[in-house]
Amino acid sequence: MDTEKLKILASQLKNPHGEKGLQVAEMMYQTNLSMIKHALQYLDIADGDTVLEIGYGNGKHIPLLFEKTPSILYQGLEISPLMYEQAIIENKRQILNQLVGLQLYNGRDIPFSETFFDRIFTVNTIYFWEFPELFLKELYRVLKLGGRLIISFIEESFMEKMPFTNFGFTYYNKNKINRLLKEIPFEMVDYQTEKENIKSKMGEWVEREFSTVSLIKNKE
């Protein structure tokens, strides 16, 4: 794949749009599903919780949150207008029942008041955070005391092998996550790493390593 095509793929992965956007979004849903399930496992949602997701994509996974906890309130933030439209189509019933709220946002400012959420999670978005320390502070602000933040991402050791990640991606590993947290009083309570075989964005079967970080807000 030439450089221009790699740039286009990277752009679509960050913000699905145009004719290719729906195809890329479906591919992301398929390849991210195991990571989403891993994140939800550590999110530890209880009935009545208010949950925020950063980057819900086409929203096909949202019903998973309601399988064991049908009375939660889910809010999602997304930068892609195309994904916003698709997620509304996929979740019409829960939206009508006022259990799901979907919004577009600017990727920086979270449009909710302080201590609004019991749980927050995000899968495969951290690479694109423009100002990660400031964004973590925003997540901290809207999380309740004792609330949990789950961040799932593909490890740097795998990401740096993918040619499209040279365009607009920031790589992460445990050490880099710890450095991010120096100025934000989250407590890291778990860091779980898994390996899986998937069909990569380049169309090849590969073994990738991903991690799920569990953070708790223990201070105001």
Image: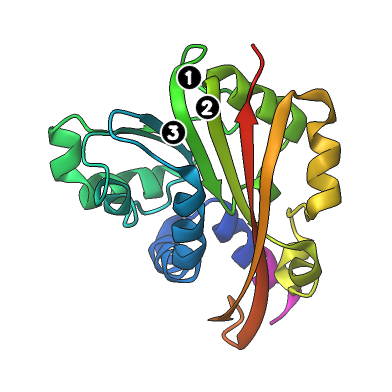
* Residue name at image x 64 percent, y 37 percent: 215
* Residue name at image x 71 percent, y 38 percent: 188
Q: Quadrant of the C terminus?
A: top right
> Where does label 3 land, which residue?
52
> Where does label 2 land, which residue?
147
Give the magenta-colored segment's residue range: 1-7
Instruction: Please name the amino acid that badge 3 sits on.
Output: Leu
Which picture quadrant has residue 64? Answer: bottom left
Q: Mark 3: which secondary structure?
A: strand
Answer whether labels 2 and 1 touch (C-beta < 8 Å).
Answer: no
Q: Is residue 97 above or below residue 68?
A: above
Answer whether labels 1 and 3 touch (C-beta < 8 Å).
Answer: no
Q: Is residue 8 above or below residue 48?
A: below
In the drawing, does residue 37 fall left or right of residue 72? right
* Residue name at image x 86 percent, y 49 percent: 175
Q: Which mark is residue 177?
A: none
Instruction: Please name the amino acid that badge 2 sits on.
Output: Gly
Q: Residues within 10 Å of mark 2 (few under 14, many from 20)?
A: many
Instruction: Please name the amino acid that badge 1 sits on.
Output: Pro
Q: Is residue 28 above or below residue 45?
A: below
Separation of marks 2 and 3 at Cα, in angstroms: 11 Å
Sequence order check, earlier mark of 1 and 3: 3
> Where does label 1 land, which residue?
111
- Can see residue 131? no
